[in-house]
């Protein structure tokens, strides 16, 4: 069972070069929901995340970490860690890293099934899957 730093809203981030998917859940109910897709070419992503954290009253940030099947970090991991470091300066919340392997593929399959309720990108759905892993497995990188 995952131990949370505190009860409250947990935000998950699926950090990509172009977009960042954001999902939320309360640490007690653990029902994930896609929240937002941040287009990094149009807004300052760190400033937007800081605003979301304040609006949602988040207590923890869960960040998807790219990894290979072997568990070793993928090449995108350095980029994610660099972003997370900059984010930590702006948003002083605990950061938890969770293996995000195959979450985008799972989100694509869900969207293809027609059950995505208007989502236009798999990024926020992938963030939901990352958040579910955080709650179910407690798998930290």
Image (cartoon, rainbow, N blue to C red):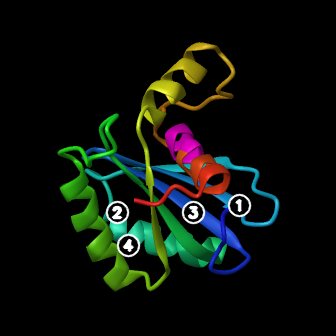
- Check contact, mark 4 vs mark 1: CB within 8 A: no
Alpha carbons under labels 4 and 1: distance apart: 32 Å
Q: Residue visible at 52% across and 55% down?
A: 139
Q: In terms of secondary structure, where does tag 3 sit?
A: strand
**Residue range (magenta):** 124-129
Which residue is identified by label 4?
47
**Which marked residue is nearer to the observer: mark 3 or mark 2?**
3
Which badge, 3 or 4, is on the more N-terminal residue?
Answer: 3
Alpha carbons under labels 1 and 3: distance apart: 18 Å
Quadrant including the N terminus: bottom right
Residue 45: mark: 2
Furthest toward the right, the residue is: 29
Q: Is residue 113 magenta?
A: no
- Check contact, mark 4 vs mark 2: CB within 8 A: yes
Q: In terms of secondary structure, where does tag 1 sit?
A: loop
Alpha carbons under labels 4 and 2: distance apart: 5 Å
Q: Residue 87: percent from the left, percent from the top?
A: 34, 74
Which badge, 4 or 1, is on the more N-terminal residue?
Answer: 1
Q: Residue 18: percent from the left, percent from the top?
A: 28, 44
Quadrant including the C terminus: bottom left
Which residue is identified by label 3?
11
Q: In terms of secondary structure, where does tag 4 sit?
A: helix
Of helix, strand and loop, which mostly describes the magenta segment? Answer: helix
Q: In terms of secondary structure, where does tag 2 sit?
A: helix
Q: Is residue 125 magenta?
A: yes
Q: Residue 123: percent from the left, percent from the top?
A: 46, 40
Alpha carbons under labels 3 and 4: distance apart: 15 Å
Which badge, 1 or 3, is on the more N-terminal residue?
Answer: 1
Which residue is identified by label 1?
1
């Amino acid at each position: 069972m995952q131990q949370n730093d505190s009860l409250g809203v947990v935000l998950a981030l699926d950090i990509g070069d172009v977009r960042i998917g954001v999902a939320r859940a309360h640490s007690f109910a653990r029902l994930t929901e896609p929240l937002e897709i941040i287009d990094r070419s149009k807004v300052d992503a760190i400033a937007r995340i800081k605003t979301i954290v304040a609006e949602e009253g988040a207590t923890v940030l869960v960040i998807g970490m790219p990894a290979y099947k072997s568990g070793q970090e993928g090449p995108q991991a350095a980029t994610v860690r660099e972003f997370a470091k900059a984010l930590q300066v702006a948003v002083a919340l605990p950061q938890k890293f969770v293996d995000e392997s195959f979450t985008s593929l799972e989100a694509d399959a869900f969207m293809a099934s027609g059950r995505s309720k208007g989502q236009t990108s798999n990024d926020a759905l992938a963030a939901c899957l990352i958040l579910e892993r955080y709650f179910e497995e407690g798998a930290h990188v």
